[in-house]
Amino acid sequence: MIEDLMRPILTVDVIPLVLKDGRMHVALQRRDRAPHANEMALIGGYVRADEDESATAAALRVLREKAGITPRLLEQLMTFSGAGRDPRGWSASIAYYALQPAEALPADRNLVLTPLDQARGLPFDHDAILAKAADRWRRRAAYSTLPAFLLPPHFTLSALRAAYETVLGRALNDSAFRRKIDELRVIQPIAGASSKATARPAQLYQLSHDGVTEFDRTL
């Protein structure tokens, strides 16, 4: 008979990513308890076996309860585990990244938007989680509609191109981008809808499919 079987700590950690002022930002939150109390960290919490149907359900609950966020897109990244990542004991964290428009973030949850390239020195192994997430979605963005989930559901082609340029870290030719997006048929115009953000109204579009669509080529 095995006595005193050690039970690992099981958590989820979520990286909320938004596009603001032409730069990618991550929404961090100050921890309200030990370990690492008062330090800025990713949004995370325990998996509740009696409540959460899955790790994804746990991640959505933690985002909702702690940050008031309902993301446009939530995708699992990978599992981080080991004896040294949490001072409370051997732990495993299932990490996710979440995408949503910056304006959809609540103003009353003490979220701190930090430029992605400046988010360093986080507790636990959150630096490693953040680095892995950034690498994953940047590579995936080149052949999918992932950047569109940083925008509101209705957007202009100019806003979509700007989102791709920010995520990919390079400029895109406007006419070539429009031609490729048209050929891929991943967005569709909204009849009678145009943006009033500029003096010259621009057609509004939406994604042709609810989930992420992958291309057979890179942009």
Image: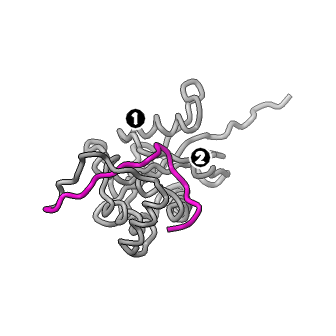
Which residue in the rendered view is the most extreme toward the right? 1
User: Where is residue 164 shown, x and y percent of the image?
Assistant: 41, 65
**Near-viewer residue (31 or 93):** 93
User: Where is residue 27 shown, x and y percent of the image?
Assistant: 38, 53
**Near-viewer residue (26 or 173):** 173
Q: Which residue does the image show at 26% across and 42% down from the upper left?
A: 108
**Disc 1 packing (10 Å; few <14; some 14–19; many ≥20):** few
Circle 1: residue type: Glu
Which residue in the rendered view is the most extreme toward the left? 199
Circle 2: residue type: Ser
Residue 107 placement, left or right of 172: left
Q: Are marks 1 and 2 in contact (CB under 8 Å)?
A: no
Q: Residue at label 1?
A: 65
Residue 193 placement, left or right of 1: left
**Near-viewer residue (103 or 38):** 103
Q: Is residue 202 magenta?
A: yes
In what element is the residue under mark 2?
strand
Which is more N-terminal, label 2 or label 1? Answer: 1
Q: Quadrant of the N terminus?
A: top right
Residue 140 placement, left or right of 116: right
Query: Bounds of the magenta span?
Result: 199-219
Residue 129 placement, left or right of 194: right
Q: Residue at label 2?
A: 93
Q: State the predominant SS element of the stretch in magenta.
A: loop
Alpha carbons under labels 1 and 2: distance apart? 18 Å
Q: Is residue 108 magenta?
A: no
**Near-viewer residue (105 or 191):** 191
User: Where is residue 96 shown, x and y percent of the image?
Assistant: 53, 48
Residue 6's place in the image compared with 153, above or below, is above
Q: Quadrant of residue 107?
A: top left
